[in-house]
Image: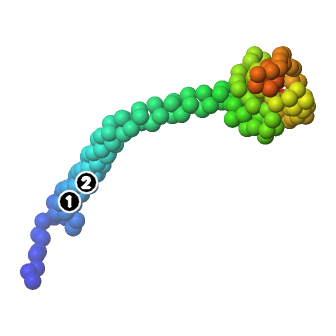
Amino acid sequence: MAVKINLLPPSERQPRWPVNQLMAVGAIMIVTVLMGIVGFQKYTIWRLEHELAVAQQQYALLQATQKKMLLGNSKNQQAAAKTGLLLTLTAERKSWYTILNRLAVVTPPQIWLTELTGGDKGSLQIKGNALTYPDLVTFLQLLEQDELLTTPQLAKAEQDAKLAITRFELTVKIKAAQP
């Protein structure tokens, strides 16, 4: 170990702490920290730009799917609106299947129906043949008592002597559906 002897007067002697060296080291440390901060910020910006590019690419890929989804939603809404309109229009109407099924239940074996025609304002025109006139009267009474068909009105009834039957035409009203 070497001993240094400083013979300079105290005002000209070098201080114990090397200020210039400490300032240089401090400046280097500050510059290093600032460069680290700037580097970290640049890395963060680069990473966020990369994530943004990936998100924009995914958005571009999903845009076609979104258009299809919106088109599908609008078609579903149109179908729902049409279904609602159809349900509103048919709420007070009976289906032909229900009417024919009910006529099959009500019609006795002595009556043959030859023609069914839908009339105006919920009416049904029925043409057919009966074995006898009393059988036709029984059929009319059954129609009056029915839950679906009401107010049967006999329009024509004529006896066919050749075939020994009674041909008839009548009009029946169909009851509206109860909500």
Res 30 seen here: no
Percent position (x, y) of residue 175? 83, 28
Percent position (x, y) of residue 135? 87, 32
As rendered, which of 137 and 61 lies closer to the eye?
A: 137
Name the quarter where the C terminus is drawn: top right
Q: Residue 141 carries which label?
A: none
What residue would you read off at disc 2?
A: 36
Percent position (x, y) of residue 120? 75, 16
Say whether marks 1 and 2 touch (CB < 8 Å). no
What residue would you read off at disc 1?
A: 25
Residue drawn where x is 27% and y is 45% of the image: 50
Whole-angstrom CA distance, mark 1 to mark 2, is 16 Å
Vertical placement of residue 159 versus 32, above or below? above
Label 2: state its secondary structure: helix
Residue drawn where x is 79% and y is 32% of the image: 111
Location of residue 88 by image quarter = top right
**Residue placed furthest toward the front:** 162
Name the quarter where the N terminus is drawn: bottom left
The residue type indicated by label 2 comes to Gly
Residue drawn where x is 54% and y is 34% of the image: 76
Vertical placement of residue 61 versus 176, above or below? below
Location of residue 54 by image quarter = top left
Location of residue 30 by image quarter = bottom left
Res 7 seen here: yes
Label 1: state its secondary structure: helix
As rendered, which of 10 and 138 lies closer to the eye?
A: 138
